[in-house]
Amino acid sequence: MLIPKVLTKLRAQVPLVHNITNVVVTNFTANGLLAIGASPVMAYAKEEVADMATVANALVLNIGTLTAENVESMIIAGKAANLANTPVILDPVGAGATRYRTESVHRIMKEVEITLLRGNAAEVANVAGIKAKMRGVDSVSEHNNSEIALEAAKLLQVPVVITGEKDIVAVNEKLSIVHNGHQMLTKVTGTGCLLSSILGAFIAVEEDVFLASTAGLVTYGVAAERAFEKTKEEGPGSFQIELLNQLMKIKEEDIKKWMKVESIRG
Ligand code: ATP
Ligand code: TZP
Ligand code: MG
Ligand code: MG
């Protein structure tokens, strides 16, 4: 079984993950990366991002609290990453909410080759320009998310992960659906951002993006389920801390036991 083994590979290699992320989630992201077994670094200055992205094993671009300087740094870092074959993960936080966010994502994607786009259904649909289709439904149903992911992957020519109650991985024509995770993840800010960075760590050690993404989602989802079990009498504060504990404690055997993956194609 391939999926659980990617975590073991990650821990053996301790990938360096360069993050250009938002001010809300910086500390949580660094701690989550450390807990899973990766090495985090946050570097933003345009004078240094190319050097950092070149030595890193993955680059994560997150537009959560975007500034003009950050967009410039993301493009410089992204281009250097492309030259160095460093995989680039893009989290289009809030794409569609403002024109600046959507346009910045398009600018980044025009200049930088993205290895994986990871967002919620609305963000991914907005980036791919399939918003019109979503307006027809009151809320985006989970059933639709697979179609949005496949269509976005095709339109943008980039591997896509859409998260939510179910997580969807769409790479070319391949699709997997991960049913792990817990609703409490929606009560802690930054759990999506941390996931994007953790997917960066998985893709750093496994070049099959479909396998790496599915493995990262399963690992994160199972850790969240275990964190909820331990803290269900308490609340999001305890859950957030316990999630870090479980990201460190989770092992191949836990993943084998608890993983819930549906492979539709692939
Ligand atoms: P949003 O802004 O929509 O919350 P996000 O960037 O925080 O998006 P999420 O879609 O919340 O990202 O995904 C983060 C993690 O939370 C993923 O592991 C996902 O599986 C999990 N998750 C989100 N919603 C649910 C849910 N209803 N039930 C179980 N797990 C969920
Ligand atoms: N505002 C700007 S970025 C951010 C907020 C609240 C964090 C978003 O994190 P996530 O992981 O998408 O919930
Ligand atoms: Mg969320
Ligand atoms: Mg998000």
Image (tube, rainbow, N blue to C red):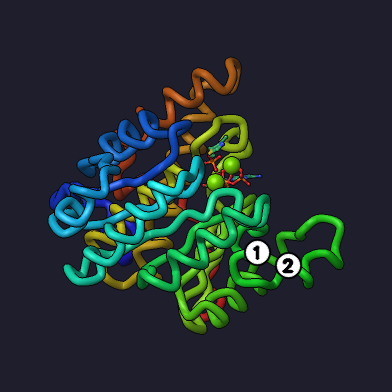
Q: Does residue 9 appear anywhere in the picture?
A: no
Q: Secondary structure at mark 1?
A: helix
Where residue 154 sits in the image (x, y, percent)?
Answer: 55, 82
Kindly identify which residue carries mark 1. 126
Where residue 184 sits in the image (x, y, percent)?
Answer: 60, 33
Amino acid type of the residue that numbered disc 2 sits on in the rendered structure: Lys
Is the residue marked by circle 1 packed among few (<14), some (14-19), or many (20+) residues within 10 Å?
some
Q: Is residue 124 left or right of residue 16?
A: right
Where residue 228 sits in the image (x, y, percent)?
Answer: 53, 30
Earlier residue among tags 2 and 1: 1
C-alpha gap between disc 2 and disc 1: 5 Å
Amino acid type of the residue that numbered disc 1 sits on in the rendered structure: Asn
Tell me what residue is drawn at x 57 percent, y 60 percent. Answer: 162
Total of numbered circles in the picture? 2
Where residue 137 sits in the image (x, y, percent)?
Answer: 85, 63
Tell me what residue is drawn at x 55 percent, y 49 percent. Answer: 93
Tell me what residue is drawn at x 16 percent, y 47 percent. Answer: 14
Q: Does residue 204 appear anywhere in the picture?
A: yes
Q: Quadrant of the N terminus?
A: bottom left
Tell me what residue is drawn at x 22 percent, y 60 percent. Answer: 205
Q: Which mark is residue 249?
A: none
Q: Nearer the viewer, residue 149 or 105?
A: 105
Kindly identify which residue carries mark 2. 131
- Asked if the residue at tag 1 contacts the one at tag 2, i.e. Cβ–Cβ closer than 8 Å, the answer is yes
